[in-house]
Amino acid sequence: MAADENDTVVCIINPASGVQRRRTIVQRIAAELPEAECWSTRYPGHGIALGRQAVEDRYGTVVAIGGDGTLSEVANGVLAGGGEKVRLAYVPAGTCNDFVRGLRPVTDLGDLLDRTRDRETDVGSVIFTRPDGTRDQRYFLVSCTVGLISVIGQRFTEKTPVNRVLKRLNLQLAETTSSIRTLARWRPVAVRLELDGEPSSLTITNLAVLKVPYFAGGLVFGRTQPPRAGYLDAVRVAGVGRIGVAGLVWQVFRGAAAGHPAIKRQEVRTVSVDAASPLPVEVDGEIVGYTPADFSIHPSCLTTVV
C-alpha cells in the first residue's frame, strides 16, 4: 500500500453509517475520485488504526466517509501517526455530521483534492482515566460531554439484554429508553472544575466542551457560532431537578435555549473536571473513559477539507 505522499488518496469508509447515503457515495468514488484507494472499517476503533496506517503508507490525502465518529477515529489515527501534514478530507455520511454543519461540503468528490479548500483546523484533546486507573488521550473535532449526556450515552452502550432487544427493534427507541431511565434516577453532581486554571467547586447537570457549536445531530446550547480560533467553548448546565432538566431539554430541542439561566458558557484554552464518583467521558459520540479529565486545544494542527 506504500504510495507517494504528494498526490495519493485513500478513502476510509465506515460501512455501518448512513447505509443508503454511504452506498451512493461509494458508487461516486469510482467516477469522481478514480485514483483513490478504498479501505473499510471492520470494528469500533478500526478507523484509528487505518488512519495511522495511511500516514505510514505516506498518503497525501485521507478521506473519512461516515459520521462524526468515523471522522474522529481517522483524525486520531492520523495525528497519532505524526501526520500533521496529511490532508484530512471528510464526506458526511452518518447520522449527526455536526462537524460540517454550517459549512458547504463539496458536491463533486474530486473537489476534495482542490488545495484552495484546505483549512488549518484547531483540534481538541482530552486526557481521561481508563477503568483500570491508567490515563489515556483522545483528540476531538466536535464535542465532549461529562454529566447527564455522557451517562445517557453510557447507558445506551451497555450490553444488557434489554438494550440488545431494543436496538434490534429500533435504535431511536433504544436511545429514548436510555434517556428516560437515566432521567428518572438523575441527581445533579458535585464537581471540581478548572477553567484556564481557575478552580471552583459547583453542582452541575452537564458539562460540554465544544469545538463546534452543534452536537447530537444539530442541537445547540443556544449559540450557533463556534468558539474563537485557539479556544474551546466550555458550556456548563447548573444543577437542576428532573423537572428543570426536562424543561431545558425541551428548549434545546426547540432551539430556544439561548439565555437560559442554567446555562453558562466561557471560551477557554483548558478545562479540568473531577468528581467524587467518576463520571463517564464522551468524546465525539463515544464513551472513552472517566473523570478526572483534562481538556485542551491545539491550534491549527490539522489540515482539513470538506
Image (cartoon, rainbow, N blue to C red):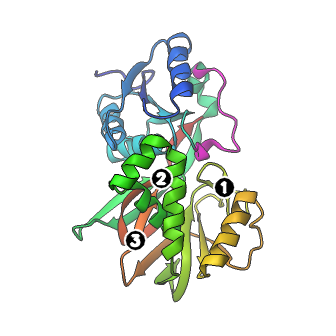
Q: Nearer the viewer, mark 1 or mark 3?
A: 1
- Which disc, if any, is residue 219? 1
Query: Foreground residue, 78 or 292?
Result: 292
Give the mark, 1 or 3, whose residue is nearer the N terminus.
Answer: 1
Q: Residues within 10 Å of mark 2 (few under 14, many from 20)?
A: many
How many labels, in total?
3
* SS state under label 1: strand
Is tag 1's residue or tag 2's residue first in the polypeptide sequence? 1
**Residue type, mark 2 in image:** Gly
Q: Is residue 297 visible?
A: no
* Upstream in sequence: badge 2 or badge 3: 2
Q: Judge whether 282 appears above or below 291 on screen.
A: above
Quadrant in the picture for residue 119: top right
Q: Is residue 255 left or right of residue 219?
A: right
Q: Residue at x 65, y 33 (%)?
A: 105
Residue 206 location, x and y as percent? 55, 72
> Which residue is tagged 2?
285
Query: In this view of the protein, which residue sits in the foreground, 182 or 191?
Result: 182
Residue at screen point 44% across, 36% down: 86
SS label for mark 3: strand
Residue type for callout 1: Leu
Q: Which residue is mark 3?
A: 293
